[in-house]
Image: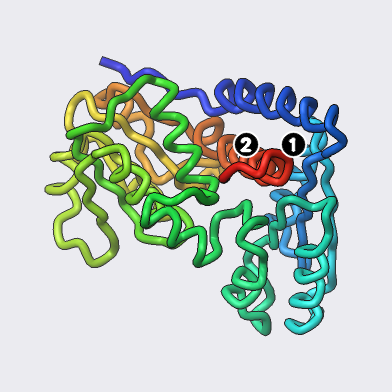
Amino acid sequence: MSAQLIDGNALSQQLRRDVAARAQALKARGITPGLAVVLVGDNPASQVYVRNKVKACEDAGLHSVLEKYDASLSEVDLLTRVESLNQDPSIHGILVQLPLPAHIDSQKIIEAISPGKDVDGFHVASAGALMTGMPGFWPCTPYGCMKMLESIDYNLRGKHAVVIGRSNIVGKPMALMLLQQNATVTICHSATPNLKTMTLQADVIVAAVGKRNVLTADMVKPGAVVLDVGMNRNDEGKLCGDVDFEGVKQVASFITPVPGGVGPMTITMLLVNTLAAAETIAHGSPV
């Protein structure tokens, strides 16, 4: 048995075509969805990420603004700039690229973003909305994972899902999204005593710890669905995930590759959230 691939590139293109069509409909009403991306410092990975985000916006017909600042920018000045973007009617989504320089409190910056423009889904108001089942922005990576499960018509009701990782960006919101779809959810992490015992019970496994080969074939129940959120480098310097792909694909029913799996979906869901923010302004409807 060899697992079927869940192609993140193909699904992303499909979703981006929908975003472009909806953006065009808004433009016909005089509203161009706008995203502001703020980059502080010269982190090479961050520069690649923001460049990809801006290009994806432009390709989908969204208005994008990239603001770059020196790493010496003060926290006060960044807060002032965020507030200006909050007040800018042409901007529907605000993304401050993380990580920020050490002298800036990232959480303080995130909380300064208006919840209605928090298209990253990191604001405490967004987290609270997700926890309580209220309308709000979902963090892009776990949101993308849910779309991938939806694309294979996977019914989570009554299934056991194991999430490896407990970050505020992926692990915790991923668990809540799975729970909303009536899965039984277990969150595992560095203090979990026997990870294999947990994963062997799982119908769905989401690996999101940023550690190579955290999930191997002997840890996966035959027929399980495996979503690999990890982004690492192997000994040859090639991109790889958290999952031993070659081994696990012989056991799982569906698996996401790295690259070309969850990664493209993250940026796509950022576009979806930005569009939703603009549609909320246009229609007065919930996010």
Residue 60 shows up from this direction: no
Q: Residue at x 48, y 42 (%)?
A: 143
Residue 197 appears at what percent x and percent y? 12, 48
Q: Which residue is mark 2?
A: 268
- First in sequence, mark 1 or 2: give its number: 1
Q: Nearer the viewer, residue 86 or 256?
A: 86
Residue 98 appears at what percent x and percent y? 64, 64
Residue 150 appears at what percent x and percent y? 41, 26
Q: CA distance from mark 1 to mark 2?
A: 8 Å
Q: Secondary structure at mark 1?
A: helix
Q: Secondary structure at mark 2?
A: helix
Q: Which residue is mark 1?
A: 56
Q: Nearer the viewer, residue 65 or 6?
A: 65
Circle 1/circle 2 CB separation < 8 Å: yes
Residue 264 shows up from this direction: yes
Residue type marked 1: Ala
Q: Quadrant of residue 99?
A: bottom right
